[in-house]
Image (tube, rainbow, N blue to C red):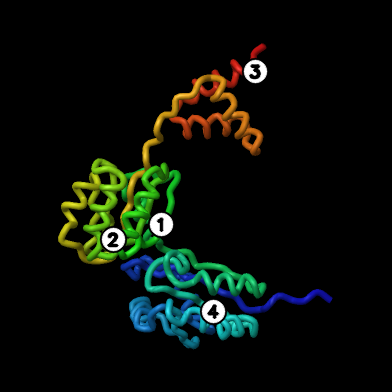
Amino acid sequence: MEEQPPAGRLVLGGAPLGRPDDVGPRLRAAIAEADVLAVEDTRRLHRLAGDLGVTFTGRVVTFHDTVELSRLPGLVAAMRDGGTVLLLTDAGMPSVSDPGYSLVRAAVDAGILVTSVPGPSAVTTALAVSGLPCDRFTFEGFLPRKGGERRASLVALADEPRTMVFFESPHRIGDALADAAAAFGDDRAAAVCRELTKTHEEVRRGPLAELAGWAADGLRGEITLVVAGAVPRAVHLGPAELAAEVAAEEAAGAGRKDAIRAVAEATGMPRRAVYDAVVAAKSP
């Protein structure tokens, strides 16, 4: 007989960024019904449950950076025994620059069902309201605390073409913006999103240098920084070279249309010019 998978499950709960009324009925039910609540901060759990009018009877276990690994065996055992573990961080989705990845990985490795009650995310919320391109983006988490390491990280991202999303502390945001302006250029567009969804929500948009001056003395609250990607630098290739680049993309598995688009984006050349180069290369 085939071995039956464990009966328990892990539920990742999306906690509100600020306003409890952003929470839907599914998270209320998950809090009330969980056998174990693994939470980043027990005080936040009690406050959230009070705001939502939810009573929970499950066992509460702290789950934050300093105890995360030591909690894994007990939580996995609870799920193996058929229990439902609800993971809640202070705000947003667990694992996204918050504790959670290690528990998800342990549950997956143990063959335990992992599901979620989706909720707010500061990453996508800030991206959506930033006014910057959202079709492709990269989340970089928190920048390094030390100035030299932070500047090196930003310089390494100077040519990143996708919109970039960062978390930053309120007392370091001024220095981070100044370093970003030095690495990306004073005129690179950005948005500082502060206290998202809360009473004092503020989104300040503008060039990096301007934002650095505005935030020089520090800010208050939870901050998410969104920075526009780099404009591709035009690479002037002849028709034969363009056709060769397209052929290389196709050899790697891309379709003709996708290969032409990729070469156009990489070189800054118009798609029509790349297409014409491919047609010319095919002509006798």
Inter-mark Cα distance, 1 to 2: 16 Å
Instruction: From this view, report whether residue 263 is shown above or below residue 196.
Output: above
Inter-mark Cα distance, 3 to 4: 60 Å
Asked whether the beta carbons under mark 4 and mark 2 sit within 8 Å of each other, the answer is no
User: If you read the primary sequence from the N terminus, does the residue marked by circle 3 or circle 4 appear first?
Assistant: 4
Inter-mark Cα distance, 2 to 3: 53 Å
Where is residue 130? Give x, y as percent: 31, 49
Asked whether the beta carbons under mark 3 and mark 1 sit within 8 Å of each other, the answer is no
User: If you read the primary sequence from the N terminus, does the residue marked by circle 3 or circle 1 appear first?
Assistant: 1
Of labels 3 and 4, the one closer to you: 3
Identify the residue position indicated by label 3 in the image: 282
Q: For the point 41% across and 57% down, which residue is it?
A: 140
Identify the residue position indicated by label 4 in the image: 85
Inter-mark Cα distance, 3 to 1: 42 Å
Q: Which mark is residue 1?
A: none
The quadrant in which residue 46 appears is: bottom left
The quadrant in which residue 133 appears is: top left
* Residue that sits furthest to the front in the current view: 148
Residue at disc 4, secondary structure = strand
Residue at disc 3, secondary structure = helix
Identify the residue position indicated by label 1 in the image: 140
User: If you read the primary sequence from the N terminus, does the residue marked by circle 1 or circle 2 appear first?
Assistant: 1
Instruction: From this view, report whether residue 246 is shown above or below residue 34.
Output: above
One can see residue 263 in this view: yes
Which part of the image, by quadrant, shows the C terminus?
A: top right
